[in-house]
Amino acid sequence: MAGIEFTDLRVNGSRLLQRILALADIGAIDGGGVCRLALTDEDRLGRDLVVSWMTDLGMDIRIDAIGNVVGTWGGTDPSLSPVMCGSHIDTVRTGGKYDGNYGVLAGLEVVETLAEAGIETDRPIAVGFFTDEEGARFHPDMLGSLVYAGGMAIEVALDLPGIDGTRLGEELDRIGYAGPHPCPGVVPHAFVEVHVEQGPVLEAKGISIGVVTGVQGIHWEEITITGQSNHAGTTPMAMRHDAGNAAARLAVAVRDIAITIGGTQVGTVGAIDLQPNLVNVVAGRAVLSVDLRNTDSAELKRAIDALGAACGEIADTEGVAIERRTTADFDPVDFDPEVIALIEQTADRLGCSVQQMASGAGHDAQMLARVCPAAMIFVPSVKGLSHNVNEYTRPADLEAGANVLLHTLLKLQAV
Ligand code: GLV
Ligand code: MN
Ligand code: MN
C-alpha cells in the first residue's frame, strides 16, 4: 500500500506504556528494576506474556531452534519478505524496564495501530524478540540474533555454558522455548530496532530521537588467574602467589589501557570471582571478566594487545598463571545509509528533534545488519542510566520513538 507512507496515523502511547509496565512486573526487583536473565523461569514467564499479546493480535508466531520468537502480521503478498522490527526481553541481573523490552513492545504497538486503522500492508510486518541479547548468563551477547543471522552454528550455541554451570540447550528445553523453526531464520527485507539510548547524549542535548549510524566493536574475555591459596597471617608478602592481587592489578590495567588509548575506547572489569573468598586466606584463584569496546577496530585491537601484555607482566611479577578465553568478539558495524536517511527524514517529518549517533551498547540490529539493511532509533535515557534499576525514559519520548518506528516501517513495507 504505497499511499500510506505518511499520514497522521499515530501509536497509542498509553497502551504501549501499559504493556511495558506489565512486562516489567515479571522479575521485578527492589528499586523498580527487573531481573529476567536469559532462559530462567522469569524469562519464560515474560516470553509467555509477550506471546499471548502476539496471539491476541492475530500474529503468526514462529519459535526457532535457539528460542527466538518472531510474530508476523499482515502483508497482502505472502511471497514478499517481511519488514522486521524487534529487540530482546531478557535483562541483566540489575536491569531496567526499558532496555530491549521497549523495542519489542513498540513493534506490537505498531501492529495494533495498523490493525485498528484497518491498514493492509504490502509486506508482512514481523516483530521479533531474540534470545540472550544481554549475554549476561550465556556469552556472547546478541546470541539469538547472531544465530538467526547465521553467525554461529546452532549446535555451538546450544552447547554454550552458563555462568551458573548450566548448558544453554538444556535451559532452552527446560523453559519450553526450543522451537521447530530453523536457524538461520528468514531474511527480512529490512530491520529497524527502536531502543533506549542507555547513555546521556540525547537528554543532555535536549534531542528526542537519535538515528543510530552503527555500533562499536565489542571484545569480551574471561580471565582465569591461578596462584596459591595460603594462610594470610603466615605467608610473607614476598612469598605469595596471590590471585586476588593479580586480579586487582589487572582491573586497574584495563582502566589504564582504555584511558591511554582514549577516543571511544572503554574498558570494564565487571565481575571478579575469588576463591576461596575468605578474610584470612590468600586467594588461590580469580576469574574475572573484561569488556573492551571501540568504534575503530584497529584501536580495539591495540587495546586487546595491551591487555595481553598486561597479563604477561602481571603473571611474571605475581608468580601466577593467567589463562585468557575470548567469549565475545564483534567488529564495529555500520548501519545501512538508506535506512538511516529514512529514519532521519521520518523523525523530521514527525516534528522531532533528531541527531545521528553511534551506539555504545550492543544490539540485535547489529547482527541483522549482516543479512539485510538495518538501522536503529534511539530515545533519551534519563541521566543516561541503563543496566541499572533506575533506567527511565519519559512516556512522551517512548511514544515519539514508536511513531518514528511506525512510519519508518510503513515506508519500508510499501512496494
Ligand atoms: C549488550 O546489550 C551490551 O551492550 O552489553
Ligand atoms: Mn538492549
Ligand atoms: Mn542491555
Image (cartoon, rainbow, N blue to C red):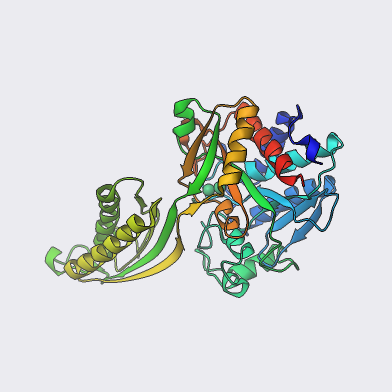
Dividing the picture into quarters, in which one does residue 251 lie? bottom left
Whether residue 310 is visible to the viewer of this picture, yes or no, is: yes
Q: Is residue 214 left or right of residue 255?
A: right
The residue positioned 74% from the left and 48% from the top of the image is 49
Q: Nearer the viewer, residue 393 or 228?
A: 393
Dividing the picture into quarters, in which one does residue 411 lie? top right
Dividing the picture into quarters, in which one does residue 408 lie? top right
Position of 14 relative to 244 (above/below): above
Whether residue 98 is visible to the viewer of this picture, yes or no, is: no
The residue positioned 57% from the left and 48% from the top of the image is 35
Q: Position of residue 109 (x, y in %)?
A: 74, 38
Q: Where is residue 216 in the image (x, y as percent from the top left)?
A: 44, 51
The residue positioned 57% from the left and 57% from the top of the image is 367
The residue positioned 45% from the left and 55% from the top of the image is 332
Query: Across the whole image, how many numbered discs are drawn on residues?
Result: 0
Q: Which of 18 and 207 is in front in this view?
A: 207
Position of 248 relative to 360 (above/below): below
Q: Position of residue 232 (x, y in %)?
A: 22, 63
Q: Which of 188 and 26 is in front in this view?
A: 188
Q: Position of residue 276 (x, y in %)?
A: 35, 65
Location of the N terminus by quadrant is top right
Q: In this view, does 252 lie to the left or right of 275?
A: left
Q: In this view, does 4 lie to the left or right of 221?
A: right
